[in-house]
Image (tube, coloured by chain):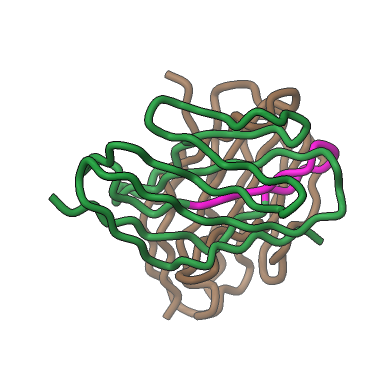
Chain colours: A green, B brown
């Protein structure tokens, strides 16, 4: 069974600075998807970025980028130029290309300080 | 507007009183799923459905039932709720060929006393 681990329950960053959230996963599969979701206080789940495992290039979405290390089974999220609106709970998630389950990590609560 | 709706948004009930949380999507998605979110545990999948009349267990199915009689609806049923089912519940849907497009509902906060 796949597992996803986020070892940082809480992180904080100063506004305009850069922060990296860590995620590791365990799988025996070679092809899969990885995601970062943001959950603001409204509780809505918002997809931030996704990565297909067969792609070597790291995904980027504006100020959000990932560092995907397939051999190390690591998938970190970098937020550049942090904004107050980035404050939220962030979840890393895994999904097999052949299966239907979405497996989430425990979450990292990000605080952005003005 | 494309959306997933859940009702109710908040519910306080007592142990053993059967309840249903409804989930509906208007995007003609094949795939629907239920999750529960608990502090320190992230979101855990309860049940999922690949299409009408096709459902399967997720990671924490005990104490829950689901049905998928129509493509748009995927209700979550707690036949005899217990306090350990106090949680935040999310329904989600996605098209089968674009699994990354997970649309989440707004969540249902359930408290069982």
Q: Which residues are magenta?
A: A91-102
Q: Residue at x 82, y 38 (%)?
A: A31
Which x, y percent locates residue B100? 63, 32
- Choose between B9 and A53: the one closer to the eye: A53
Residue sitting farthest toward the left: A114
Q: Is residue A93 magenta?
A: yes
Q: Quadrant of residue A24?
A: bottom right
Up the image or down, B41 lies above or below A110; here it is below
User: What is the tally of numbered marks visible in this picture?
Assistant: 0
- Choose between A21 and B79: the one closer to the eye: A21
Which x, y percent locates residue A68? 63, 42
Residue sitting farthest toward the top: B1
Q: Is residue A7 left or right of residue B74?
A: left
Up the image or down, B9 lies above or below A66; here it is below
- Choose between A113 and B58: the one closer to the eye: A113
- Choose between B88 and B65: the one closer to the eye: B88
Which x, y percent locates residue B57? 78, 57
> Quadrant location of the N terminus of chain B?
top left
Q: Is residue A92 left or right of residue B54?
A: left
Q: Residue at x 60, y 55 (%)?
A: A104
Q: Residue at x 53, y 62 (%)?
A: B42
Q: Is residue A101 magenta?
A: yes
Which x, y percent locates residue A37? 49, 43
Q: Residue at x 38, y 41 (%)?
A: A79
Up the image or down, B13 lies above or below A73; here it is below
């Amino acid at each position: 069974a796949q597992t996803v681990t986020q070892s940082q329950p809480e992180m904080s960053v100063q506004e305009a600075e850069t922060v990296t959230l860590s995620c590791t996963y365990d799988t025996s599969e070679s092809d899969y998807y990885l995601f970062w979701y943001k959950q603001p206080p409204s509780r809505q789940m918002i997809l931030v970025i996704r990565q297909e495992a067969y792609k070597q290039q790291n995904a980027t979405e504006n100020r959000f980028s990932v560092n995907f290390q397939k051999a190390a089974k690591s998938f970190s999220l970098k937020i550049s130029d942090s904004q107050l609106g980035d404050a939220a709970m962030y979840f890393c998630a895994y999904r097999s290309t052949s299966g239907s389950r979405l497996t989430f990590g425990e979450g990292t609560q990000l605080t952005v300080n003005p | 507007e494309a959306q997933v709706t859940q009702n109710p948004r908040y519910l306080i009930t007592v142990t053993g009183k059967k309840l249903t949380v409804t989930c509906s999507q208007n995007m003609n998605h094949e795939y629907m799923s239920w999750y529960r979110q608990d502090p320190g545990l992230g979101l855990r999948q309860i049940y999922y459905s690949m299409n009408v009349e096709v459902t399967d267990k997720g990671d924490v199915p005990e104490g829950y039932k689901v049905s998928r009689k129509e493509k748009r609806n995927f209700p979550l049923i707690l036949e005899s709720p217990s306090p350990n089912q106090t949680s935040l519940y999310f329904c989600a849907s996605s098209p089968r060929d674009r699994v990354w497009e997970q649309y989440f509902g707004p969540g249902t906060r359930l408290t069982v006393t």
